[in-house]
Amino acid sequence: MYYLIGKKLSHSFSKQIHHLFGNTKYDLCEVNSLSDFVKNHNYKGFNITNPYKTEVISLLDELDPIAKETQSVNTVIRRDNKLIGYNTDYYGLKETLNYNQVNIKGKDVLILGNGSVSKTVFKLLTDLKANSIVKLCRTIRGQNEYLFKDYKNYTDYDILINTTTVGMYPNNDTCSLLSLTDFSKLDVVIDLIYNPLRTALLIEAEKLNIKIINGLQMLVMQAKKAHEIFHNIEIPKNLANKIYKKTFNNYVNLVFVGLPLSGKTKYAKTIGKYLSKTVIDVDQCIEKTEGKSVSDIFLDKGEAAFRLMEHDSVIKIYKDHVLAVSTGGGLIENDKAMDLLKQNGLVVFLNKNPKDIARKNIYNRPLLIDPNAIFAIAKRRVPLYIKYSDFVININGSTEYHINEIKEKVDEYTNR
């Protein structure tokens, strides 16, 4: 058997990724005693995540050169009665930078955190000839390290890489360590967290039109290298890239936004069936909870109360994966709720012409008692749909045509 070991692994995608590489004898194992696992468990090899990447070194017989230099191990294999430790995170991050065409040479890079992963990042950045590398941390332990509160001294840096667990599942809503609005030259923000797919840090960067990269590809690429070590084989890089895209597509939510009667529920149900995603209709969830229709909720409790119910519904689902979500037309006006949905979701704006909606037989829509009201709603909301959407689908063809268009755009997202 092969394992990923760590204290808490509820956030991990590693089992599914190794299975896609062909290792079906790979499982997750939460351990409280690293020494007990290493000495007494039956395994051929294992991966290690926090907080054991440095602690495991004292239990091993040999280290590969990168693991020795960084004092960080994430892959161990039993070979010739010896336990040999490797650092495949280095390879994973290097391939991620290559795939995303991020050039490090001559750049000033800010690292958040000074744990074991940060050592690997520092080593790679040094090898790639970064101009300057600074770590921000809570407790200074070495050279080139400064406290988080001093981050404004480095707001002219080019690249920021988060190696901390701040914002990682299940603590998705933890506040970011610093504000990106203070930075004047940032080209790229990289967060090595992959669950959620977009942390609050990455969402803020995206709003500032800064290129973002999450930790999913690094996870897949380090798993590729670990799989090669475990089984003494070589995996083509294009296969690993396909597994990265498949993993992203499997886990990402698709969140449909648009004007009332633009087809959000229909498209969520259809794409959910095509891509095996659980369908969530926010309005229907509220109706089920309240035991009455949206129209009656508006009548009895008012729009403000309904908007709070919408937000509560988002709180219940935003940490989940593999969803197709149909939102109410007005949810787009709730900035906080939209930011939460974007953590694990690609937002799809179904852009239907308000004139086509006004021609429909409209009933049971509290904000559309007069069909012409759709034009006022569109004037207010369409700019917000565009602001929050990851891509726009102009509804002017068949459902099948647009479903294929959505699938293509999701694939394109991983090629940015």
Image (cartoon, helix red, strand yellow):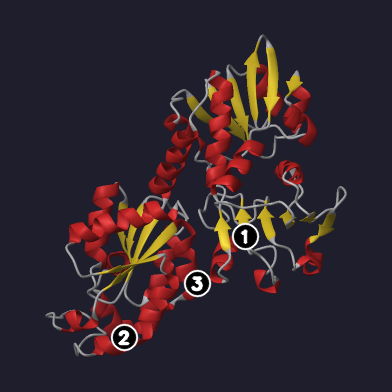
* Amino acid of disc 2: Ile
Crowding around mark 1 (Cα neighbors within 10 Å: few <14, some 14 to 19, many 20+) is: many
Q: Secondary structure at mark 1?
A: strand
Task: Look at discs 2 and 1 and give the one toward the viewer.
Answer: 1
For residue 188, the mark is 1
* Residue 33 image offset from top left, x and y in percent: 68, 29
The residue labelled by disc 3 is 336
Residue drawn at point x = 53 percent, y = 46 percent:
216
Q: Secondary structure at mark 2?
A: helix
Going from N to C along the chain, the mark reached first, 2 or 3, is: 3
**Kind of element beneath mark 3:** helix
Q: Nearer the viewer, residue 41 or 108?
A: 108
Give the percent coordinates (x, y) of residue 256: 33, 65
Measured as percent of width and height from the top left, residue 198 is found at: 52, 57
- Tell me which corner region of the image, top left, top right, bottom left or bottom right, holds residue 49: top right
In this rendering, the answer to whether 201 lies above or below 88 is: below
Residue closer to the observer: 398 or 179: 398
Q: State the residue position of label 2.
A: 377
